[in-house]
Each structure stands twice: as C-alpha cells, then as structure tokens.
Amino acid sequence: MLNPEIWQKFTAGQWVRGKLPPVAGPFCHDSRRCRAGEIFLALRTERTDGHAFVADAQRRGALAAIVECYREELSLPQFLVPSVLQAAQALAHAHRRQWGANGLRPLIAIGGSYGKTTTKDMLALLLGPHTLATHGNENNILGISLNLSRLGPEHAQAVVEIGIDHPGEMALASAMTRPELGVMTGIAPVHAIHFRSLEELVEEKLGLLRDIQASGGKIYFSASCLLQSPFHALANAATILVFREEKHLVLGFPSLVSCELRESSSELRLSFERTGEEAYSIPSLSQGQVRSLALALCVARDRRCSREDLQERLRLWQPPLHRGQWKSSSLGRVYLDCYNANPVTMQDAVDFFHRKTADERRVWILGGMRELGIFSEEAHRRLGRSFPLRTGDAVLGVGREMEGCLEAMQNRTIADVELEYSETGEGAREWLCSHQACFFVKGSRYYALEQLFEGLWN
C-alpha cells in the first residue's frame, strides 16, 4: 500500500501524535478477518461502528487503523480523518496510480447489469497468475477501494468489477480506478431501485466507457448493448462482440468480433479482424456464460495472450461457489446457481437447465429477483408466462416477488404441474424432501437457497 508518510497529501487526515507504521498493507474492514500487515478501516454503518473493533484488529496483527475517533488506550498507529470511507477511496486511488506505472500495468474494468463476476473470473483466469482480480463480488465503492489497496508489484494487470446502484456512483468508481480498458457485459433493468427509468440507468453505466474512450483506452461491449441507442455513439470506437442472431444490430459498425457456439462439439469460434478465425474447446456453459467467455477471450487476445495459452488455461475453469454448479444430493442431482438473480441471468440459467434435463423429472426452486425497482412486478410475471414448464414439473417460489410469477404459471393450461409458495424458504424443507428429482435452484442472494439442502449433500 502507499507509503504512510505521504497519506496526508491525499486526504484531510493526519497520524495522531506523529505515530505511523513503517509500511502499510491492504485494507480490511472486518476485524475478524484482519491479517497481519493490513490496515483496519473503522467504518460506521447503519448496523455497527467499526471503532468498537479497532482493538480486535490490533490483536489480529493490523499495522494501523484509519479512524474518525482516536482510541487513546490503544498502541496501534491511528490515521485520524473526517470520513474513513472517503479516505480509503482517496488512498486507494493514489495507490492505483502509483502501481499503474503510467499504463505499463493496465487496469481492466468490468461493468454491466449482469455477467460481471463471471466475465471477471474468466478474464482473470485467461490472463494468467500475475493478475489481481476483484475478490468475489466486492464491486461497490468500498469493495473497489479494498481491491485497489491489494495491488502489488507482483501484479502485471488488474481486473476490477464495478457495480453501481445509485446515480453518481459510476463517475466516482471510474475516477478511482482510472481503467485503461473497459468491458460492458450488457444492460438490463437490474439494481434499478434508485433510478427513475432504464434510460437514466443506461446513462449512468455508459459513463465508464465514455471516460475510458476520452482517455485513449480500449472499450469492448456485447452487441446487445446496441439495443440502447446511447451506445451507438461509442460503437465506432469499440470492439463489439456479436453472435449470429445479433448481426442485424451491428450493421454499419466496423470493429467486430464474430462468435459462433457449436454446442454439439463444445466449440466456440471467434473471428478476429487481425488474426482470422480461432476455435476453442470449452466446458459445458450456459449461453450467458459463453458470452462472458467470448468477451474475456477478446480482451485476452488484445493483451497478447496466445491461443495455445488461453486454451490451456480454459481447461482449469471451475464454476465459483453457487454459480452454475452441478452437485449431488440424497434427493437427486442439483443445479445450484443461487449466487444472485435478475431477469437475464434467470432466463439464461432456466434455458440451460431445460436443455440439460430433457428426460428427467424436475423440481424448480425459484427465489425472488430483488432490486428490480419499478420493473419487478412485470419481470416476475413475464418469467411465469414464458417458463418452460412441462407435465410432471414441480415449482417452489420463495419470496413475495414470486407470487406474481406463480400466479402467471397457474393461469397456464399445463397438466400435472405442482406449484408451492414459501415466503422465506424456511417452511419448505418438508415439501422439498418429499421429491426425488433433478433440482434447479436460483434466486437472489438474499434468500440463500442453498441452505434448503443443508445435510442433504452427498
């Protein structure tokens, strides 16, 4: 982390009584997870005050703490600031600029309404071991600060995920990260509670690519983004990923990478302007995951990774926890994809499971899709109207958002379909255990649907 002697240059803070550590490590904000050499952020939130845990952070080896109130009884060096969060942002930004060595170590920002974490994980894998990637989904302003503080000389590049849910956050995130490359996965009415319209949400997210283009960086996005007209102004400067069914969206835009998935042979073909067509053997992925992979391959090839290296690294791909995992339980096979959910990722996962379970009895466990704001009611009803139900299926809807979805299913004339509702999922255990089937499990993280299977995994 940035030399503690110069922290005052970037913040309105000071080291109390001139006591400071000789060096500084990455930030941590949870004292229970603090490790030796880290800097503890004493954050105040609606639930708790981090100043109550500074002593615990010291016991666990923290080198110093950034605080708003000085703890006189502690020997730990303390950097006193008006706002811990703002100080963390400023210091992380300064450290990122120092680490970047004037562009010799590039930072790649991943934005969009869906698929960010999968794209980030795939790109980090493809770029190789000297890549820092956002931990999990730490993609809000605090999470970005935490990850920037982890940048070290061992990292040749960084892949940082940016998630926003309030107006103005993208400008702040873009200014903090100063990316040289940017990827937009797609746009949908997700995390829209604080936006008045989809158009306002699009403008917010588009700010990332505009900033990168203005600074001379490279931008990439999926052809589906062109369904939103503001993207047209950037299309001539972007590398656009286009699948065959999207060709009509890109007429007149020159910088394209054409993609084709040959599902029967598990092969993804990409046609690049400079190097021509390349083929990659890929694991079993949903259509959405394939698009994430194609975007990651575009960036990795531009970063001069060889096709041979990329193919070899692809063999190491494993789905992260709760993201498209096939697991075995005492009740039958389970497709576990309950890390999060929105209309695009829900439909993608449903289509994938539907294709993979043509001859099996199925139980669908569907958690509500939260944070859709004004789009929520119609999104859930649309899911119910188009859901690929067949005779013998059973559906458990969890959460109040799913009431409209189940009602739409009920109004369809499909024989022998069992529909069940549970507000929290806690009362659904007995219902679940009465079925032997192949299970689909997806919903917003809030519902933690994997807990329904506790004690049932093989």
Image (cartoon, grey):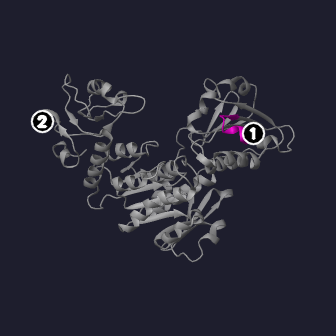
Q: Quadrant of residue 77?
A: top left
Residue at left offset 28%, top offset 27% = 54
- Measured as percent of width and height from the top left, residue 4 is found at 19, 42
Q: Which mark is residue 18?
A: 2
Q: Is residue 327 above or below residue 245?
A: above
- Measured as percent of width and height from the top left, residue 179 is found at 37, 58
**413 left or right of 321?**
right
Residue at left offset 25%, top offset 44% = 1
The amino acid marked with disc number 1 is Leu
The amino acid marked with disc number 2 is Gly
Measured in 3D between alpha carbons, the distance from the residue under mark 2 to the one under mark 1, in whole angstroms, is 63 Å
**418 left or right of 133?**
right
**Depth check: 311 or 7 in front?**
7
How many numbered callouts?
Answer: 2
Which residue position is annotated with label 1? 406
**Depth check: 218 or 283 in front?**
218
Q: Quadrant of residue 280?
A: bottom right
Q: Earlier in the sequence, mark 2 or mark 1?
A: 2
